Every structure is written in C-alpha cells, then in structure tokens.
Image: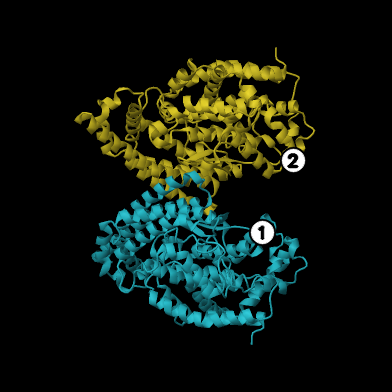
Chain colours: A cyan, B yellow
Amino acid sequence: MTATSDTHQTTYERLCQHVRETTLLTSARQLLEWDERVNLPPAGAPFRADQVEYLAGLVHQRQTAPQIGEWLAQLADSPLAEDPYSDTGTVIHRLKRDYDKRTKLSQRLVEELARMGVLGQQSWATSRKANDFAQFRPVLEQILTLKREEAAAFGYEESAYDALLDEFEPGEKTANVARVLGALREQLVPLVQQIAASPRRPNAQLLKRSFPVDRQAEFARRAAAAIGFDFQAGRIDLSQHPFCAEPGPFDARLTTRYFEHFFPSGLFSVLHEAGHGIYEQGLNKEFYGLPLGQSASLGIHESQSRLWENHVGRSRAFWEHFYPQAQEEFAALEEVSLEDFYFAINDVQPSLIRTEADEVTYNLHVMIRFELEQVLIADELAVADLPEAWNDKYREYLGIEPPSDADGVLQDVHWGACLFGYFPTYTLGNLYASQFMARAEQDLGDLDSMFRRGEFGPLREWFRERVHRQGRRYSATELVERVTGRPLSPDALMEHLRTKFGPLYGLG
Amino acid sequence: MTATSDTHQTTYERLCQHVRETTLLTSARQLLEWDERVNLPPAGAPFRADQVEYLAGLVHQRQTAPQIGEWLAQLADSPLAEDPYSDTGTVIHRLKRDYDKRTKLSQRLVEELARMGVLGQQSWATSRKANDFAQFRPVLEQILTLKREEAAAFGYEESAYDALLDEFEPGEKTANVARVLGALREQLVPLVQQIAASPRRPNAQLLKRSFPVDRQAEFARRAAAAIGFDFQAGRIDLSQHPFCAEPGPFDARLTTRYFEHFFPSGLFSVLHEAGHGIYEQGLNKEFYGLPLGQSASLGIHESQSRLWENHVGRSRAFWEHFYPQAQEEFAALEEVSLEDFYFAINDVQPSLIRTEADEVTYNLHVMIRFELEQVLIADELAVADLPEAWNDKYREYLGIEPPSDADGVLQDVHWGACLFGYFPTYTLGNLYASQFMARAEQDLGDLDSMFRRGEFGPLREWFRERVHRQGRRYSATELVERVTGRPLSPDALMEHLRTKFGPLYGLG
C-alpha cells in the first residue's frame, strides 16, 4: 500500500466515523418521532417539537461541517472513488450528493421544517378529528411557504416540485413521473370501467363481521413472522396511521390499527409495513447510517411493502396456506369458502380512503395527490380552494365525492408532516414491485406453489441479495433496470392487474 | 434598573437558555432509556448503548462548557444570587453546585458510565433469567471499578460512598444516614418480632385468586386518575420493573406489571409510580430543566411515591371508598369482607423481594443493600462473595434465605444500572413521607374521612404547594424541617407503623 492510498484510507475512515456518529442523533430523532405517533401524551407535543427541532439543528450542523467537504475533496480523485459502484465509491459519491444538498439549506430552515413536522401533524390530527379544514388551513399555508423556500434553496431546473421529489426519489424528475403515471392512467381507467361494468361482485360484507381485535393481532403477528419479519429486531405497535420506523439497525418498528368489524385493514397494514421492515432488516447492518446500508429510495421501499401486501398477501396461493388457520381463529369465517374470502379481499371499488383502496384503484388516489401537490407548490392553487379541488378530482377520477373533509382532503398525514413529493413514490413502488415480481418468477419458478406451502424464504432472499444488500449503490432507476433487465414502464403492473382481476371479474 | 443589574439579568438569561437547551438532550436520553426498558427489541441493545453513550457525552460537554463557569462567576456576587432561596438565587447556587460536580468528571468516564448503564442492565436481565450470578459478576466488577473512579473524581471527606450518595440525596452523608437507619432498626426489629409472635394472620391467599389482567389495568388506571395523575400529560406502560420516567415536562410515564394470581403487585406499583408522576406533574413547568423545576432529591421523590402507595393506598379509608368498585370488578372479591381484604393487603411477613415487601419489613431490605454497597464500594467485599454475603444478611435481618440468586442478590436492577447510593433514598423516602403526612393531618384535619369520600385533592394540593412547587429551592433536610417543623427522625414512621399495625395484629 502506498503512502497516498494510506492517507486516502484514513480520510475515508474519518469521514465514515463522522457519519456514523451523526446517525446516533438521527436515529434518536427517529425514536422521538416514532414515540410521538405511538405514545406521546397530548400535552407533551410542544416540548417534543422543541426536542426534534433541536436535534434536527445539531444533525444539520454535523451534516454540513466544512470538514466533510474537505474530506470529500481529498477523496474525489482517489482510487477509492474511481468506480462509483464499488463499496467505497458508493459511499463517497452518495455522501457527496448528500453534502451538496444539505449545505444548500440554512440551519434555521431545517429547524423550522422539523418543528413544523411535529406541530403540523398535531394540527392535522386535531382538524381531522373535528372535520374542520379551516383549522388546518393556516398551518398548511405556513408549511407550503417553508417547502417552497426549501425547493428554492435546493435549486431546480424545471419545477420546484422536482427539488422536493428528489429528496424521496433521488434523481427522479417530475416530468418523467408524470409521463409514466399518465401512461398507466390510460390503461388503468378502462380496466376500472370494465370491472365496474362486470355483473360479478364479491360479498364484501363477510369481512365486516366480528373479528376480535386480540386475535387479529395474534394472526397478523404470525403472518408477519412467516414472511420473515424478525421480532428479535423489531416490534408491532398501534397508531392512528400505520407506518414503519427504524430507530436503530436492529430495531424495525411497524404500526397498525385493528377494527373489530373490518378484517382486512389491520392484517394488510401489517403485511405492508412488514415489507418495509423486512427491507430495513435486510440492509447491510455493518454500514448502518452509511449509503451502503441505506435504502435506495422511497419508491424502492414502497415496492417492498406493496409486494408483500398485494402480490403475496392478497394472492390466492397465500390464502391456500393461511386460510385454514384464519378459519380456526375467526368464527366469522367458519362458513365462508376460500373463494368467497379471496374475492372479498380483492373487491375493486372506487372508494374514499387511499390506504384502504384496492390494488386497481389505489393508483388513482395517488395521481390525484400528485397533481394537487404540484399546483400547491407552484402556488397555482390556493389552500383555501384545496378541499374543492380535491373533491373535483375524486369525482373526475373515481366517480365519487367525499362526504366530509375528514374522509377527503384531511385523510392523509403527509402534508401536515411537511411531506411533499412523497405521494408519487407509492405508485412508483407499485410499478417497481410488479417488475421485480415478474423477474423473480422467472428466476425462482412458480412462486404460487411456494406460497401454497408457506414458503416465503426464497422470495425474501431473492430480494435480499438483489435489492436490500445493495443499499444506495444504484439509483432506483438503475436498480430496476439491473434487476429486471427492463426500464420502468406500466406494463408489468398492468399485466399483473389483468391476470389477477380478469378472471375474478370475468373480463374478456 | 441600573446598567449593572441589566447585564446580570442578561447573563442570567443566557445561562438559563443554555441549560434549557441541554435539557432537550437529557430528555431525549430519558426517552431512549425509557424505551429501552419498555419497548426495545433484544437485538437493539448494543446500538442503544451507543446512542445513550453519545448523548451522555454531548450533554457532558454542554454541562461543563467553560462559558457556564464564566457566567456563574459573573453572577456570584450579583444581587440575583444574594438570597440563595430566591428564584434567581436558587437557580444560580444550584447550577454552581452542578457545574462544580460535572466538571470533576471526564467525558470518557461519563460516556463509559452511560454505556455500562445500558449494557449492565442487559447483562443483569439475562443473568437473572438464567439464575446465574457468575454471568453478571465480571460486569458488576467493571461497574464497581467505574463507580470508585467516579467517587474519586468527585472527591469526598469520609468515604467514597459519600460521593455517590450525594448524587441522589444532595448534601446527605453516609454517617448520618447510617445513624438514622440504625435508630430506625432498633425500633423496627422489636416490632417485627412482636408481629411475628402474634397469633393473628390475614388470609393472604385471597389475593392469589384470579384477577384478570385487563381488569386490573383498568382499575389501576382509575385509581391513579382518582389520586390525581393526569393522563393528558402521562401514561402507563408495562415493564419488568415498575418505574417512572419523564422525557418531557408534560410527559410523566409510569410502568407496572400485572400478575393474574397476585392482585397487590400491579395496583400498588401503579399507586407508587403515580406518586412519582404526580410529583413530576406538580413541578413548575415554566422552569423545566432548571433547578426551580427539578425534584429536590430522590428521597423526597420517594416520599411522594411511598405516601400514595402506603399511607393512602393501603389505608382502610382508601378502601372504604374503592372496595365496592373492586368487588364489582373482580369476582374473586365478591365474598370477601373489607376487613379481610384490608388485613390481607397489610400482611407483614419477612419476605424475599423488596418491591413486594410490606411497610414494616421493607426498610430491612433497604438496610441490607445499604450495608452491602458500602463495603462493595470500599472494596471490602469481593463481588464473588456477594451472593453469600447477601444470603447471610437475609438470614440475620429477616430470618429467611433466598432459594436462588434470581430471587436474592439478582432481584434488583440498580447495580446493573450503575446505581450505587440510590437504595438508602428508599428508606429516607419512607421517613420523609411519615413526617410529611403527620404534618398534613395537622394542617388539613382528618385525612381518612376525605379518603373515605374519595377526596384526594386537598392532600395533593398540600404537597403541590409545599413540596412540588419548591423544586430544588431547599435541600431535602431543609425541606423536611421547613414543612414539618422537625428534623429528620424515625419517630413519625414508627408512630405510623405502630398505629396502623398494632390494632391489626392485636399488639399491646
């Protein structure tokens, strides 16, 4: 080893050590935020906002320390950075990207956004409970001002929305997402119409009988363990909105909520969040906090949750394995055939609530939000006019009108949590999931016969090697192309939906 | 206002602002530690130790920032510091004390202690589960080395133990505690013997019938709310060992555990921890993190928990109010008379487990630990010989021998959590509680008749004004003298025990 490479190695290690230490703070902040949504007594919210704001400021100081810039400059032309897909190259290039982005934001803005993230969620929760958008309106206006400021600080070529989207789906552009979603919509709307015109309907009522909540929790826990969620390094809690957090490398936390008289909600939320958790648990823990141990993008994250929820959890094969257990657990299912149950959990209906939507109409909910947040950020829609715009879109896309803002524009926590540019990653996740699954089927053979035997390990390991263990080595776009051999397109998702729902609804 | 006092005021405000910001980190650490004991998946422990160690280091840096020393020096002779019992005087003098102590510790030692606090608890939990002291032994040896180092760094006049005790009971000395505990023991042992010789025995079996856990939880919650624990600013969770944490000014968190076949454990733990919580909730939130908004000492803290648990919760009057509700809730009590129930929850028996001990023998458990930890710290007892020494003391003081280390020397979390000098505060708490209660009865009139009506507000407010709202204005010793008009002595506790247990056991 030459003296020069020795120096580079030392610099590289110092850089990594600095980032690892920062992660001790970001993970503490994650716990504060997880706790806020799961445990925090109501009166504790303002102080929690102070804590999160302060930690965000400390983290920002560490992330923008000039020393990082110097280390990165020293490493830029070193052999360690030469191959951008090598371990060291990945770390250096991704950290450079992060550093360049973080240094564009002022500490004041970072702290304000962190604070608003806590207070905005509280305001949203209160307004939703009271079904009173007017309460939330000034807060959302403040949030939008901050988000526009953030986008301007990051800078962008085409639209401010690009800058926000890039935080969740690095390198992705609004125009490209709009193109893909547009192409999807063209094929999706006719399918929704065909299904609506079909005389076949499942008996959805059978999922609305009594399903005791403690038994649901036990059953969901068993299902999560079966697909590979590791409870030695994770847990399940209750919260208003299901989510997954990871306040440490061996600490993946799912949440869900159970309704006694609506079975699918709790279980499929658990399978969904367990998909996120399995991704987190599959990351390379040796590099926790470093780009090699981080998820590639939110869209890739969502692909992992949606595939376990839908491609696996709502498949007939999955239930051929689990249905006898479900019948033992729930008296309400005793007389229900597997076929009727399977059809009921795949009921396609225009509906109000995104998180409860079926696989087919789900993406229409996402498109509505994607379009609305673009015009909000561009200041082409006033917040005061948002509820009406929301309801118009629901009429146009889904043919229904929300009876209240609580079940309309106030249904999602995201905007209150300062998350703009996040929604489209849900549909990107669906698209990625379908492409991945088509390829996995090619590689592994008949997946359904595995699921029927309760074998989920081969599929999980397939993802572990190709997706989880890659961390941020590739962008989402690169990763999808590398793993599936094809660029992103709506084809695999449409193929999946037609193959699955065609026979159910007797489509030609 | 003169120019000088203006400057002092500004300095004072800067000092307070610095401390308030530090509190954002100490409270975050508290949440990490609370979460470790309530939620953390097993595999998450090593990283949690990293997080806590790192935060402890950051906090130490802030607590020992030379700027604090300069501010304090500027304020030392200012009018703001003149009266040590004024608001500003309290803040300045207490912060000076804290600063002088903190600056004696190296950052390395603080970080190691924080780290060992997490890892030691994990090791203790594993060893206890396996009933294998040998596993815990090397960890305890490491901890003792660190604690001796800590005591040496703080410095002391008489014994290293003084330095550790001072962390929990500021200003208190080992010799004084030994004197008071010795005097207590002299009166306590004959009482224990008299009771043992009494032919009267309660039917303790009636508390070992089936008490469904969810009903216990509901009942305990109702009782905690009745004595004044505010659930808008607090919550109850489950953990192996009941405790109370406060990761924010409006966020007091109790834990307990329920056993279906042993009723008293869950409820009295809740009343005990709710006493801690009510103290925290009664502190002046305007000064959260500053000496005016902090508890006076652990002994004073414990006085608040023990009085609600024992003087209130195990009184006949309390149950004259609550027993009809308990009978409605628990079929096991339907045929049990109030008198039999009251006698059963006040069963005096030499027993193995401190936390389950009755009011009379409880303090003997504490004395054993107080004596053992003094010789451990003084290096006069080898850790290898600790289990035998423990068992010897239990034979000598309580006439029983632990059948296993799990129920013997491994029963308490404290030593694994690096807490030495903590145990005697339990008995100090009992002594303070009795003195306070005797005085409260003088001031408020017949407390029993209030409890009988379910009125706990007057007692709570009496403490709020005299104890809670005083923060750290007075030392524990000063506070007890000011509130009760008498110096600390065993008299009030012995009077309480004789008055309560004499009639139950038919003593002369």
Which chain is mark 1 on?
A: A
> Identity of the amino acid at label 1?
Gln
Image check: B478 left or right of B14? right
Q: Nearer the viewer, residue B375 or A351?
A: A351
Amino acid type at image mark 2 = Ser
Camera-nearest label, 1 or 2: 1
Is residue B370 something that shows in the picture? no
Give coordinates of residue B162: x percent, y percent.
42, 26
Q: Residue at x 77, y 31 (%)?
A: B336
Q: Where, quadrant-wise, is the C terminus of chain B in this rendering?
A: top right
Nearest the viewer among A397 and B206 is: A397
Q: Is residue B278 above or below residue B343?
A: below
Q: Chain of mark 2?
A: B
- Residue B161 location (% of width, % of height): 44, 27
Are discs 1 and 2 located on one and the same chain? no
- Whether B344 is drawn above or below A368: the answer is above
Say which residue label 2 marks.
Answer: B210
Q: Quadrant of residue B7?
A: top left
- Which secondary structure, mark 2? loop
Q: Residues within 10 Å of mark 1 (few under 14, many from 20)?
A: many
Picture layout, residue B107 above or below residue A191:
above
Residue identified by numbered label 1: A216
Crowd rating for badge 2 (residues with CA inside 10 Å; few <14, some 14–19, many 20+): some
Furthest-left residue in this view: B3
Identify the image quadrant of residue A378.
bottom left
- Name the image quarter holding the N terminus of chain B: top left
